[in-house]
Image (tube, helix red, strand yellow):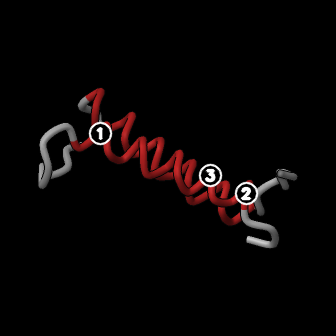
Amino acid sequence: MRLNPPTIVVFLISLVIAVLALVTKLGIFHMPRYLPHQEYWLAIIAYLILMTGTVVRGL
């Protein structure tokens, strides 16, 4: 399997979601809780977006 670097857009989307997870976990920014352990799921989603960007060519 050949891995490709993600595009800047995919990287920035995953970075924004990861920073949002970190900021809400630290309590700097208040975000309503829709799920238990919401910060964990935001971090997982950010990782999955970044992983998809490296595995899928041209994304």
Q: Horizontal and vertical percent for residue 44?
A: 42, 44
In the rendered image of this protein, does residue 57 appear above or below residue 42? below
Q: In which quarter of the image is the C terminus?
A: bottom right
Quarter of the image for residue 40 reads: top left
- Precedes in sequence: disc 3 or disc 2: 3
Q: Which mark, residue 50?
A: 3
Q: Which residue is drawn at 83% across and 51% down?
A: 1
Tell me the residue at 77%/63% (across/down).
7
Residue 11 percent coordinates (x, y): 67, 54
Q: Is residue 4 left or right of residue 14?
A: right
Which sits in the foreground, 39 or 48? 48
- SS label for mark 1: helix
Q: Residues within 10 Å of mark 3 (few under 14, many from 20)?
A: many
| C-alpha distance separating marks 1 and 3 | 17 Å
Q: Do the residues labelled 1 and 3 touch (CB within 8 Å)?
A: no
Left or right, residue 39 beside residue 34: right
Disc 3 vs disc 2: which is toward the camera?
2
Between discs 2 and 1, the one toward the N terminus: 1
Name the one closer to the observer, 31 or 10. 10
**For residue 16, side relative to residue 38 (left or right):** right
Kindly identify which residue carries mark 1.
Answer: 39
From the image, tell me which residue sits under label 2: 55
What residue is rendered at 49% in x and 49% in y? 46
Q: Nearer the viewer, mark 1 or mark 3?
A: 3
Q: Pick out the residue farthest to the front.
A: 1
- Label 3 close to label 2 by CB (< 8 Å): no
Say which amino acid is labelled 2.
Val
Give the SS element for disc 2.
helix
Q: Report the Cα–Cα distance between label 3 and label 2.
A: 9 Å
Residue type, mark 1 in image: Glu
